[in-house]
Image (cartoon, rainbow, N blue to C red):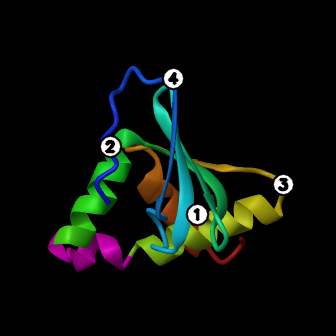
Amino acid sequence: MGCNFSDNASTVSTHAPCPLCARLATLQAREDSWHVTCPHCFRFTLDAYLLDLFDSARQRMDVRILDLLPRLSDAARRTAAEGGQLNLTGENWRAAIRAAASPDK
């Protein structure tokens, strides 16, 4: 995706592929996270680490990560439908996948 903006930029906005579903989305850099507005995944945030991780996985065709992205997209849509916003970080993204896969959700 190549969205490399300086970390000290207060707000930078760009149109680029959604980090979760690869559809055209608006990504806005704010403080320490990216705010994404996607027609498929709706609204969610992710940190710079995950943006780089998912971008790198697409470039390398790393199916271990790419196969998990649809579940994160589902989690983002479900959270938005419940009135919330999914906030993904390097520390919680795998837990969000497990929560999305649990039968009680």
Q: Verify CB contact (< 8 Å) between mark 4 and mark 3.
A: no
Q: Amino acid at mark 4?
A: Ser
Magenta part, dominant SS? helix
**Element type where label 1 sits in the image:** helix
Quarter the C terminus occupies: bottom right
Residue 14 location (% of width, % of height): 49, 50
How far apart are the alpha carbons under marks 4 and 3?
26 Å
Left or right placement of residue 75 versus residue 66 in this view: right
Please indicate, yes or no, whether residue 66 appears anywhere in the rendered image.
yes
Q: Verify CB contact (< 8 Å) between mark 4 and mark 2.
A: no
Question: Nearer the N terminus, badge 3 or badge 2?
Answer: 2
Q: Amino acid at mark 3?
A: Gly
Is 61 magenta? The answer is yes
Q: Amino acid at mark 1?
A: Ala
Label placed on residue 99: 1
How far apart are the alpha carbons under marks 4 and 2?
18 Å
In this figure, which residue is indicated by the disc labeled 3? 83
Quick one: 58 or 15, which is closer to the camera?
15
In this figure, which residue is indicated by the disc labeled 4? 10
Pointer 1 local density, CA inside 10 Å: few below 14, some 14–19, many at least 20: some
How far apart are the alpha carbons under marks 3 and 2?
26 Å
